[in-house]
Image (cartoon, helix red, strand yellow):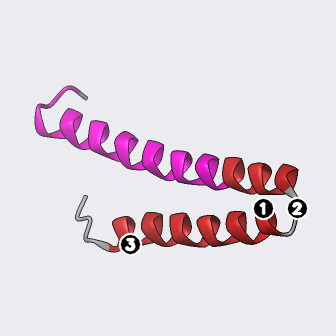
Amino acid sequence: MAYDVNAIFQIAGIGIIIAMIHTVLKQSGKDDWAQWVTLIGFIVVLFMVASFINDLFQEIKRVFLFQ
């Protein structure tokens, strides 16, 4: 479970890209698409974080020998 800073940069990068796409779509009058893009970006990041939390709980189980 050796995580470096890459996961944080990936999440931040997704957030920045989603924010830019949202702004462009909103300014072009496509508010519905902008909201969908934001929702999809949030779901992608949520799955990434859930995966990291799952790995954390597996590591905790391994450390305390709950297997």
**Which mark is in front, 3 or 1?**
1
Disc 1 designates what residue?
Answer: 26
Q: Write down the region rendered in magenta.
A: 41-66
Q: Residue 33: percent from the left, percent from the top?
A: 85, 55
Q: Identify the mark at residue 29; answer none if there is no mark.
A: 2
Q: Earlier in the sequence, mark 3 or mark 2?
A: 3
Number of other residues with Cα within 10 Å of mark 1, as a class: few under 14, some 14 to 19, many 20 or more? some
Left-right relation of 22 to 28: left
Q: Amino acid at mark 1?
A: Lys
Q: Earlier in the sequence, mark 3 or mark 1?
A: 3
Q: CA distance from mark 3 to mark 2?
A: 30 Å
Secondary structure that dominates the magenta span: helix
Real-space Cα separation, disc 2 to disc 1, in angstroms: 5 Å
What type is the residue that disc 3 sits on? Answer: Phe
Q: Is residue 33 left or right of residue 54?
A: right
Q: Which residue is mark 3?
A: 9
Residue 16 as seen in the image, left or right of residue 3: right
Q: Residue at x 23, y 43 (%)?
A: 59
Q: Residues within 10 Å of mark 2 (few under 14, many from 20)?
A: few
Position of residue 61 measured from the top left corner of the image (x, y, whole percent): 22, 33
**SS for tag 3?**
helix
> Is the residue under label 1 in contact with that under label 2 (CB below 8 Å)?
yes
Which one is nearer the viewer's eye here, 26 or 60? 26
Q: Residues within 10 Å of mark 3 (few under 14, many from 20)?
A: few
Q: Residue at x 36, y 42 (%)?
A: 53
Please check the rendered image and state whether residue 52 is part of the magenta-colored stretch, yes or no: yes
Quadrant, the N terminus: bottom left
Amino acid type indicated by mark 2:
Gly
